[in-house]
Amino acid sequence: MPGNNGRSRRQLIEAFETKARAKRTWVQKLEDKITSTFGTFAFLFFNLAFFAFWFVINSNLFPGIKPFDPYPYVMLITIVSLEAIILSVFVLITQKRQAKIDDLRDEIELQVNLTTEKEITKVLRILTIVLGKMGVDAKKDPELRKMARPIDTEEIERQLEEQLKEE
């Protein structure tokens, strides 16, 4: 690929993602940290232990310990509801930012693929000319003729739009 100093596609995409991560604001870094911390088994087990403790303390199982949130555990329900809302918002924010990065990465991949396709088509045309000078009529090969034609990106776009309409 011209202009990439010999870097592979994978290296190019990884470099892009590294730059995107480096450009995050401190708030975005905090969001990512919260999302990654709360998306663990440790957090799940912490929640389970917390709920079990809450139920035991508030179920009148131990004499001398007065329940501060007796059944139906209104305070616990409020805490859990707020936790769910806050965690959902963090997950949505992180997913939205990741979707933007994914879209940009897909655009890079598309541009690389289109460039590669143009280069391969050009090589096939040159090969056809060379074969012709060697006395081989490559134009009789329908598959090679088809491969040597440039891809009609507008036709592909139209087909994709039709598929999206059907869904």
Image: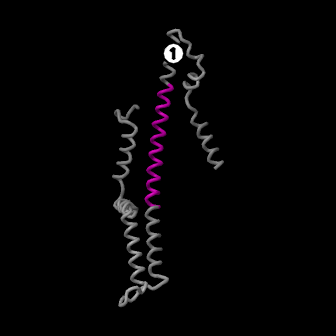
Q: How is the image coloured?
A: one colour
Q: Main secondary structure of the magenta part?
A: helix
Residue visible at 47% across and 23% down? 123
Q: Is residue 2 magenta?
A: no
According to the picture, the residue beneath numbered tag 1 turns out to be 129
Q: Quadrant of the N terminus?
A: top left
Residue visible at 55% across and 28% down? 150
Q: Residue furthest right?
A: 166
Q: What kind of residue is marked 1?
A: Ile
Question: Which segment is the magenta one?
Answer: 92-121
Using the image, determine if residue 41 lies above or below residue 9: below
Location of residue 163 (image quadrant): top right
Q: Position of residue 120 (x, y in %)?
A: 48, 27
12 left or right of 150 in image = left
Instruction: Mark 1: give few (<14), some (14-19) or many (20+) Cα within 10 Å.
Output: some
Mark 1 secondary-structure assignment: helix
Using the image, determine if residue 80 lies above or below residue 99: below
Using the image, determine if residue 72 lies above or below residue 27: below
Q: Position of residue 95 (x, y in %)?
A: 46, 57
Residue visible at 35% across and 33% down? 6
Using the image, determine if residue 15 lies above or below residue 34: above
